[in-house]
Image (tube, rainbow, N blue to C red):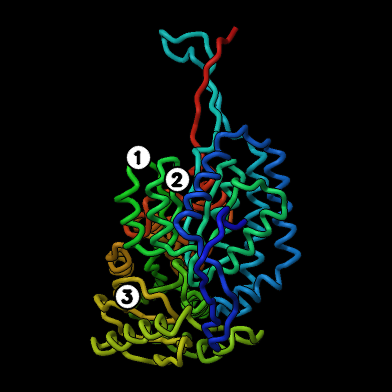
Amino acid sequence: MSAPTAATVSLTVRNPYDGGVVGEVALADRTAIRAALGQGAEWAARPLPSRHQRATWLNAIADAVEAERESLARGITAESGLALKDTRVEAARTVAVFRFAAIEALADRGESFSGDITADGRDRRAHTLQLPAGLVAAMTPFNLPLNQVAHKLAPAIAAAAPIVCKPSERAPLSGLRLGAIVAAAGVPAGAVTVLAAEPEAFLDEVLAEDRVAVVAFTGSVAVGKMIAGRLGYRRAMLELGGNDPLIVLADADLDEAAALAVTGAFRSGGQRCTAVKRILAAEPIADALVERMVARTRTLVVGDPADERTDVGTLISADAAASVEQRVATALEAGARLLLGGTRDGALMQPTVLDHVPRDADLVASETFGPVAPVIRVADLDDAIAVANATPYALSSGVCTRDLQSAMRCVRELRAGTVNVRELPGYRSEVTPFGGVGDSGLGVKEGVREAIRAMSFTKLYTLPWT
């Protein structure tokens, strides 16, 4: 759905690969943003739609996305530069998000308690209800521009919490199109609004509106911390990125580990918070692992993201690619060894494999959002865990080992919201909890079920037993 008030400024969206115009987007001004928030707040005061009605809406949205999957995937590719292979997966995941939300909308997860469990207890029963927390304001980033919006809208609809969502101004078209699909499915005006706006204007109006109960933000650490500092006595859902390690121990299946490292580092051009950002390779097998990684990377097709053969498309912009290129150059100056890639053409960054990357190089000390596979050599599991935890981020991780004790040590000791054994850090189901701590967020989890909880509050009521 669009903002209730017409905007007066437009934004031209261009294809990062060839610079062609993909679309024009009207930007909501501050008056329109305030109107959208006000409409959402008014909707929050209405009687709740039934669980059946919420599930019906969500399934209708899933049906519509399913019917338009190919068109949606091509739209994502055009505005973001992500390879069509990846955007087709994203469109399919979006269908799953709404399907899971429809199931959860039907689930009444209230609890019951007895009042006579203490010596001086009373003969009463206590029950809980999950009710919408109130108006939700959401902001999503340019990567996964359809599914990121779906992960905000679907749980809000399931929880009956009105939501105003602003997709990234760098890739807004897919989110706006999803908003139109939501409206066509019959979700009432005010319950869901998707609008394009300048981020500063949107945030200012959101933070000034006392009726906003929850702010859901996926994006940079700097903006997330600013939101947390200004939000006051309101709930925050902050997913702020990651610096995710893939630990490869001496007993690992090296073909499997190399496949995970290459897929995790280069899928979606490395522009994922759960991309493999650091490969921590045990010294005894590091040479063999790197050899396999280089061989696999050479097979990747790099280029036009709309070509079905392409594995790695562009970054979101030439500036973003230039930033990654500079980070690689700085790591090389610090002693890293370039094995493959390292160059760019406009927004197209070649998949890059580096070995012997210094542990304190900025490339691996902070999040690098691009197709880079930096290998850090470690002595053993103790060393790997120490290096993995030596970052302010704590989102996700993967570990390649055939030893259960080593795997469980990683589960216990890695500072991360997720530990995946013999799998990518980015592996998840749309329904499972997802999120991190530290600079990766506040520990409030995303994923359909967890987000519904975050957008709800628990009401207790008691009744006499007899």
Q: What x and y, as percent, mark residue 133? A: 49, 38
Q: Position of residue 264 (x, y in %)?
A: 49, 74
In the picture, the quarter occupied by the C terminus is top right
Distance in Å between CA atoms under marks 3 and 2: 33 Å
SS label for mark 3? helix
Compare residues 296 and 176 and report the one nearer the observer.
Answer: 176
Of tags 3 and 2, the one toward the viewer is 2
Disc 2 marks a residue whose amino acid type is Val
Amino acid type shown at disc 1 = Tyr
Describe residue 410's horizontal placement relative to residue 129 as left or right. left
Residue 39, quarter of picture = top right
Mark 3 or mark 2: which comes first in sequence?
Answer: 2
- Residue 437: image location, x then y, percent: 36, 54
Which residue is drawn at the image coordinates 32% and 69% (left, top)? 384
CA gap between label 2 and label 1 equals 10 Å
Nearer to us of marks 3 and 1 is: 1
* Disc 1: CA contacts within 10 A as few (<14), some (14-19) or many (>=20): few
Secondary structure, mark 1, is loop
For marks 2 and 1 on the same chain, the one whose residue lies earlier in the sequence? 2
Residue 233 is labelled as 1
Residue, disc 3? 364
**Label located before the other in sequence (3 or 1):** 1
Report if the CB atoms under discs 2 and 1 are less than 8 Å apart: no
Q: CA distance from mark 3 to mark 1?
A: 35 Å
Residue drawn at x 39%, y 92% is 339
Residue type, mark 3 in image: Val
Kindly identify which numbered label has been placed on residue 214: 2
